[in-house]
Amino acid sequence: MKKIISIFIAVLFIIPLFAAHIRGGEVYYRYLGVGSAANLSRYEVTLKLYIRCDATTQQLDASEPFTVFTKVDNRQFGNVYNAPLSREQQISYDPNSNPCISNPPKDICYRMRFYTAIIELPDDPDGYIIAVQRCCRIAGIENLQAPSDSYGATYSSEIPGTNVLPLPAHNSSPVISGNDAVAICVGSSFTYDFSAKDPDGDSLVYFLCSANQGGNRSNPLPNPATPPPFSEVSYQPPYGGSFPLGLNATINPSTGIISGIAPFTSAQYVVTCCINEYRNGILINIHRKDIHLRIADCIPLKATLKPDYDYCDDFFVAFKNEQSNPPGSVYIWQYGDGSKADTSRDAMGLIQHKYADTGTYKIKLKVILAGQCTDSTTSMAKVYPGFYPGFIVTGSCILKALQFTDTTKTKYGVVNAWRWDFGDEVTAADTSHQKNPTWKYSTLGTKKAALIVQSNKGCIDTVYRDVVVKDKPIINLSFKDTLICSNLPIQDTLQLQAGGLGNFSWTPSNRILNANTANPLVFPTNTTTYTVQLDENGCINTDSVKVRVVDHVTLDAGPDTTICLTDAITLRPNTDALAFLWSPAASLDNAKIKNPIAAPQATTTYQLLASIGKCIVPGEIKVTTIPYPVANAGFDTTKCFKDTVQLNGKMTGSTFLWTPSYALSSTSVLNPFASPLTTTSYVLTVYDVLGCPKPGRDTVVVTVRPPIKAFAGNDTSAVVNQPIKLMASGGQLYLWSPSTDLNFNDIQAPTALFANSGVYTYIVKVFTPENCFSFDTLNIKVYKTAPDIFVPNAFTPGKNQNNLFRPIPVGISRIDYFRVYNRLGNLVFSSNDGRGWDGTLAGKMQDPDTYVWVVQGRDFTGKIITKKGTMILIR
């Protein structure tokens, strides 16, 4: 039998070789029955191609070449079939169709062109591949390697052979029916429909696959198509054929619905869906559709929550929507604990709630926008606070078993799951699910151990700890060198302090108590070095502490000193004491340390008791306070641009200096003249010789008003007995002179009314409250005529004179429009602000000819004046 394929191909056109306009396509076919001979089958094959809606006529093909290949050897079968255009359909996304999307996309538009051919083919054991190739895709596709407009596309479909589909059975391919013009917003949850209907009732399985190339800029419409296997496009990491929209978007293999979170970049993305078609459990066909999806910079209204939430810290919890929504969205939360619903207007719906008791609660979220758009969802909140994860490590030696002990505490439920990662870099098997495992390290260094711990109430957390592996156990000594005082009848006892894991022993054994503990007591009469040994399961380390014996305490509290009042000073006595007690303590940050910080509010003598054990010695230091020199730079002031002001400084001290010197008449007088051109802060610095070594400072800010740029308006014209509104600018206050024929002379925009023709000149003073001012002049030519718009009848663009064609308003308050048309009625120039035409269109000089013009304006009473006529462009 022969298979006829009516190939209906919605194709993108080609513009001269480099046109980039393809937006996707697919080939599908329908079995029509026996062909013109008994051994032939008849099929209608359709190629539907998506092209840009702004494609020009030159870019649209009247027909497309359709090539058939035998699957057994990928060789061309027969001639290329010419598929003529049979119909066209335009689909687009209406930005007004969904008021629940903020900033909706306005450029989602596909021009679908369908090309059809009827093909008769003999049944073949291996079947056929039908393909059409076209260049080029559009520029700037985000998930393809640049330049994306150099890629073409191959659209193909497979006709199964009799090996997989024995006669008399035949196949019609699936037809994808989803809406392609949909809005998908950046960073938001979305769905896109690739679902298809199969005319034969076959089972369909959907998956995402790589798009195929086909055609290039030098051969944009291969005829015939290049044979399979077809090369794939090159994707830009992190995208790929199986994840063209990133890892957060997947396709449901049963429904063909893509869902997930859209990419966070607004751009075009190539997405290809492959559909495996099964009949009686046998794969008979792979159908493909290739589409460019526009991810738009819009914001949809969506209620989105995680599947569940675990709150293990306290009863005070926080909820938020998991994506941004349009401004003005209102979030209504129900917490599932019987409390009243709460409303949030936060951008993400953020809200806080305190549960009264533990439990698993069903939370509900409803989002409302403008009272008409809503969405809702639910989730579960597991509230079981009092979960405190932790662990300790016992041991530190290489090739010795270190004990890892879970110390996690939970107030509710029980800890029931552990996953340890010991951070051993030499193996991947350094994990355990025991509660308290052991591990031997074979290398030295710091290991990052981790414990993921979970309770039966859903609380889960991860804690980390650095494990230091050494060839010897770690001994932590609180001090390596210390003192003890022995002066009969005074005899001190000192406690040594060591930290570590294992068994301790100290030597020498004389004049020591508890020598086999970490913290023995010693009372030597002479300087002695005590050695400690730590035995950690056969791994040994040693360290030592030197205890020096003295018979008295040395102390020099330091010389008396002077500071500036309100300053602080660190007291630094010279002593070998180990303990300290200062008084008075009120002005010290810590009266029990060697070097406290003192901030006395008056002259103070500090007493010190320094001690080594029971040996004590007193000392003292006097801190005298001297007030800072007084500097008064005067009040901040404001001046006009290029004006001069006098500073008024005052001081109590011996010397002074102004800084910076910029625009000052002198830096060494208290009342210098300042003339800065920009706002400047001047600092007065005062010194004295009373004992405070630091200066006093004060700052005065001279604010400089920017230059006044007075503008009275452009010279204009008016007519007798018609009011005209003047408009000045450049300042805050205005004064017009003379005041003749003005309704007011002290406002920004007075109205003038002239009884006689002539030329009138006005001067406007523009000034600020500080009397910074400037002047400008306005000339008004007054005619004895009605308000009118005069337009010349010819102009010569490109010449020195008469090179701009524009209307001349008299007594007109505004020009509504001024338009110029060529002989064919095409608009060549338009303006609404009185601008003139320079004789060009899109930068191209227009030919000498007669042109039609029309102008409309309004006089100062609001009356509309419309005129039209012709003029000649002369070159």
Image (spheres, helix red, strand yellow):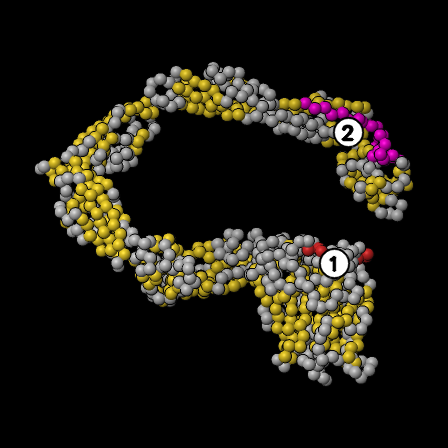
Horizontal side of 232 relative to 384 (left or right) equals: right
Classify 10 Å Cα crowding around label 1: few (below 14), some (14-19), many (20 and above).
Answer: many
Q: Does residue 794 appear in the picture of this structure?
A: yes
Percent position of residue 320, x then y = 49, 56
Task: Tell me what residue is drawn at x 69 percent, y 27 percent.
Answer: 711
Magenta segment includes 797: yes
Nearer to the camera, 557 or 200: 557
Q: What residue is disc 2 on? A: 716
Labels 2 and 1: the sequence-earlier one = 1
Q: Which residues are magenta?
A: 775-804
User: For the residue marked with disc 2, what is the amino acid?
Assistant: Thr
Q: Image quadrant of residue 455?
A: bottom left
Task: Tell me what residue is drawn at x 29 percent, y 24 percent.
Answer: 561
Q: Does residue 739 appear in the picture of this structure?
A: no
Q: Image quadrant of residue 548?
A: top left
Horizontal side of 311 relative to 178 (left or right) equals: left
Task: Tell me what residue is drawn at x 80 percent, y 43 percent.
Answer: 842
Percent position of residue 709, x then y = 66, 26
Q: Quadrant of the N terminus?
A: bottom right
Percent position of residue 572, x then y = 28, 31
Magenta segment includes 872: no
**Mark drawn on residue 216:** 1
